[in-house]
């Protein structure tokens, strides 16, 4: 890692901070709420975990940029990106349902 440029260090540092922020959110939400009981809670935790995993990927692939570990990391990254896409589809569905329910309650 000694051959890393300043921009690479900044990228890795930001990724570490973002990974920690996501982990703190998931841990705090887990302690403070029964997130697993609602679809919205599961989506919030899943999305935070997926974003945290992408940030962690950035850190790990910087440490192991080549070789078998890098291949495995890239495969895992692809799975996490698919999860992000699915979570966004779920979030869109939740949004539309909430808007429909709100419209039904107000009579508009």
Image (cartoon, grey):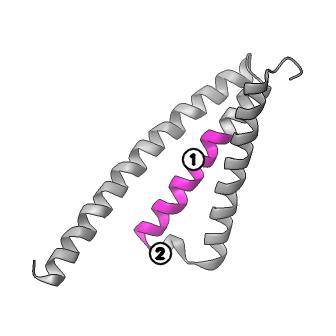
The residue at the point 41 percent across, 42 percent down is: 85
The residue at the point 70 percent across, 23 percent down is: 70
Residue 32 placement: quadrant: bottom right
What x and y, as percent, mark residue 53?
63, 44
Side of 25 relative to 66 (left or right): left
Q: Which residue is mark 2?
A: 37
Numbered badge on residue 51? 1
Q: Earlier in the sequence, mark 2 or mark 1?
A: 2
What x and y, as percent, mark residue 104?
14, 78
Secondary structure of the residue carrying numbered label 1:
helix
Furthest residue in direction left, as rendered: 108
Give the class, few, some or many, for how many residues have Cα within 10 Å of label 1's Cα (few <14, many ≥20): some
Q: Is residue 67 above or below residue 8?
A: above
**53 or 19, which lies in front?**
19
Furthest residue in direction right, as rendered: 2
Q: Is residue 105 above or below residue 57?
A: below
The residue at the point 47 percent across, 44 percent down is: 83
Secondary structure of the residue carrying numbered label 2:
helix
Side of 43 relative to 61 (left or right): left
Quadrant location, the N terminus: top right
What x and y, as percent, mark residue 78?
52, 31
Q: Main secondary structure of the magenta part?
A: helix
Q: Report the span colored magenta.
A: 37-55
What x and y, as percent, mark residue 74?
61, 26
Circles 2 and 1, Cβ within 8 Å, touching? The answer is no
Quadrant location, the C terminus: bottom left
**103 or 32, which lies in front?**
103
**106 or 34, which lies in front?**
106
Residue 59 placement: quadrant: top right
Q: Nearer the viewer, mark 2 or mark 1?
A: 1
Q: What is the CA distance from the residue labelled 2 to the residue labelled 1?
A: 21 Å
């Amino acid at each position: 890692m000694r051959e890393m440029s300043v921009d690479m260090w900044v990228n890795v540092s930001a990724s570490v901070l973002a990974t920690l922020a996501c982990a703190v959110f998931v841990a705090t939400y887990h302690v403070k709420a029964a997130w697993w009981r609602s679809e919205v809670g599961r989506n919030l935790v899943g999305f935070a975990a997926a974003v945290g995993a992408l940030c962690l990927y950035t850190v790990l692939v910087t440490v192991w940029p080549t070789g078998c570990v890098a291949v495995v990391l890239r495969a895992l990254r692809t799975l996490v990106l698919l999860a992000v896409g699915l979570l966004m589809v779920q979030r869109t569905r939740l949004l539309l349902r909430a808007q429909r329910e709100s419209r039904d309650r107000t009579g508009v």
